[in-house]
């Protein structure tokens, strides 16, 4: 079945740093989504991407839908302490029915540098 | 708007007990979903309902049943709980498949 590889698995940030993470797939996706999950909460939708090459921003967050339709990137500029949490990518495959449901990556955990 | 609400927030069951997790959304969305989240596994789809009156299996449906009670409500039932069903359960809703909005989750422990 379709799978997403999300990297890195975890990273430490210092306030003010820029952060990058990405998701790749072996198959083509129609849509890419990025979510953030805080401890004890449900995932919250950050950005949705619908076209290959699309670049979309939401405040300090910028996400891109890869040209090959097999990857997506999320960048956070000038990170602040409240950026910590787990970031998930999700993709919708090109097939209909149950195979058109969202597939989730395993997440990138952002923590503050000790 | 409350968005997606789930009850209960926490639950502890003994092996073999049954329970129903409740989910409701006030966004008038057609589609609703149940996921489970386990450490290192991400979110996995249990069941979904593309529209009122329909339900379909997702990636990990075994041991669960669902009911789409009306457009607002979608419940998940564990008939005979097993320790392997210890997890955090999330309900979500969407107008189309994409842009799903999640509830706060139910943390279930089966001993």
Image (spheres, rainbow, N blue to C red):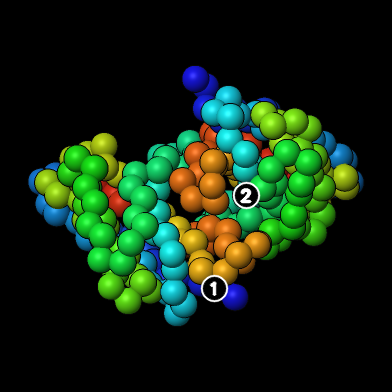
Which residue is painted at 26% across and 60% down in the image? A54
- SS for callout 1: loop
Q: Which mark is residue A2?
A: 1
Which residue is painted at 86% across and 39% down in the image? B18
* Residue B40 seen in render: no
Instruction: State yes or no: discs 1 and 2 in contact (Cβ < 8 Å).
Output: no
Q: Quadrant of residue A79?
A: top left
Q: Which mark is residue A46?
A: none
* Mark 1 neighbour class, 10 Å CA radius: few under 14, some 14 to 19, many 20 or more: some
> Residue B94 versus residue B34: which sits nearer the camera?
B94
Which residue is painted at 54% across and 41% down in the image? B95
Q: Which mark is residue B35?
A: 2
Q: Position of residue A85 (x, y in %)?
A: 35, 45
* Mark 2 neighbour class, 10 Å CA radius: few under 14, some 14 to 19, many 20 or more: many
Q: Position of residue A86 (x, y in %)?
A: 38, 50
Gap in angstroms between the C-alphas marked 1 and 2: 17 Å
Residue A108 sits above or below residue B9 on the image? below
Q: Quadrant of residue A70?
A: bottom left
């Amino acid at each position: 079945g379709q799978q997403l590889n999300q990297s890195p698995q975890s990273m430490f940030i210092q306030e003010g740093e820029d952060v990058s993470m990405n998701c790749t797939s072996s198959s083509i996706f129609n849509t890419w989504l990025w979510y953030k999950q805080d401890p004890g909460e449900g995932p919250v939708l950050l950005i949705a991407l619908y076209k290959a090459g699309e670049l979309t921003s939401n405040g300090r967050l910028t996400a891109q839908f890869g040209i090959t339709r097999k990857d997506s990137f999320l960048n956070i500029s000038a990170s602040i302490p409240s950026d910590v949490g787990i970031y998930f990518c999700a993709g919708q495959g090109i097939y209909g029915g149950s195979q058109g449901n969202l597939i989730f990556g395993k997440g990138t955990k952002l923590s503050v540098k000790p | 708007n409350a968005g997606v609400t789930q009850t209960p927030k926490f639950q502890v069951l003994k092996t073999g007990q049954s329970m129903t997790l409740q989910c409701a959304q006030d966004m008038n969305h057609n589609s609703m979903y149940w996921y489970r989240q386990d450490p290192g596994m991400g979110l996995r789809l249990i069941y979904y309902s593309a529209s009122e009156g329909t339900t379909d299996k997702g990636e990990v449906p075994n041991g669960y049943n669902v009911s789409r009670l009306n457009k607002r409500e979608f419940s998940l039932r564990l008939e005979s709980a097993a320790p392997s069903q210890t997890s955090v359960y999330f309900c979500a809703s969407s107008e189309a498949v994409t842009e799903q909005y999640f509830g706060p989750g139910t943390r279930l422990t089966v001993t």
